[in-house]
Amino acid sequence: MNTRLIIAIDGPSGVGKGTVARDVAAALGYRHIDTGAMYRAVAWRAKTAAVSLDDADALTALAERLDIVASGPSVLVDGVEVSGEIRTPEIDRGASRVARVAGVRTALVAQQRRLGAGGGVVMEGRDIGTVVFPDAEVKVYLDASADERARRRLHDDVRRETRDPGQVAGEMAARDEADRTRAVAPLAMAADAHLIDTTPLSIRQVVEQILAIAAAGRGRS
Ligand code: DC
């Protein structure tokens, strides 16, 4: 069977969505799209263009006109490679604020739907299975204990985190709470998603579970 699926992977920060989504996409020959990087890109551009994070209209206009490429290892914003610069504590906070703006979400969700149309895509984020692709054939919600997520974040090679582990864990918990309780498209598990508690699992084990779910999904469609 040759159906090219949409695989939606949602979950809180530090759970390992990026690595897992990349590996699942590679195994299937699908594109990997990191939607968190798109919210980060808007926050990064707002910072460099001195746009206030309180100015919803200006942020929406940015999201509507920016050319963001968030598939593959590099993230490009209007042709500028920003993959390192968007993964800093400042942009962590900025992206979470930008992601609360309804107009920003409308603009980015429209782009995400265009990118995923036709399938053959692994898209990771917070609202992929609930809002962006509620009809995705495969929906996975990854979770892990707060301690384990903080540990993974501290070992993230791109970030080279040197701050106090307690501070990192505290900031992550605060951002997750904001993502879960915001008015628009909060982080939530879709009713028909497969929940995987990754706390005791290796990346490879998580990837294998998702590939098994995807194989069953292909069989059905
Ligand atoms: O996955 P991440 O940490 O790179 O995401 C950055 C921020 O963007 C985070 O605060 C959650 C938000 N986000 C979102 O609201 N919806 C998405 N689909 C992806 C990320």
Image (cartoon, helix red, strand yellow):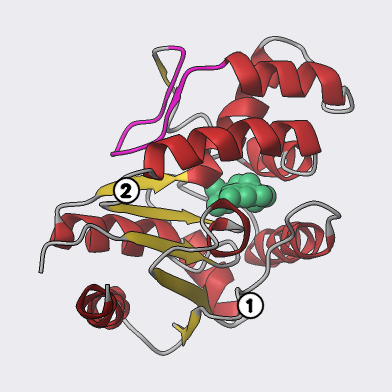
Q: Residue at x 63, y 77 (%)?
A: 146
Distance from disc 1 to disc 2, alpha carbons, whole Å, reads 25 Å
Q: Residue at x 49, y 63 (%)?
A: 135
Query: Can see residue 52?
Result: no
Is 153 or 129 nearer to us in this picture?
A: 129
Specify the segment rendered in magenta: 66-78
Extreme right residue here?
54
- Residue 190 picture location, percent across and down: 60, 74
Is 167 or 153 nearer to us in this picture?
A: 153
Q: Secondary structure at mark 2?
A: strand
The quarter of the picture where the N terminus appears is bottom left
Q: Is residue 22 left or right of residue 89?
A: left
Q: Is residue 79 above or below residue 103?
A: above
Q: Is residue 204 left or right of residue 197?
A: left
The quarter holding residue 211 reads bottom left
Is 189 or 4 nearer to us in this picture?
A: 4
Please name the residue that numbered disc 1 is placed on: 146
Query: Can see residue 85?
Result: yes
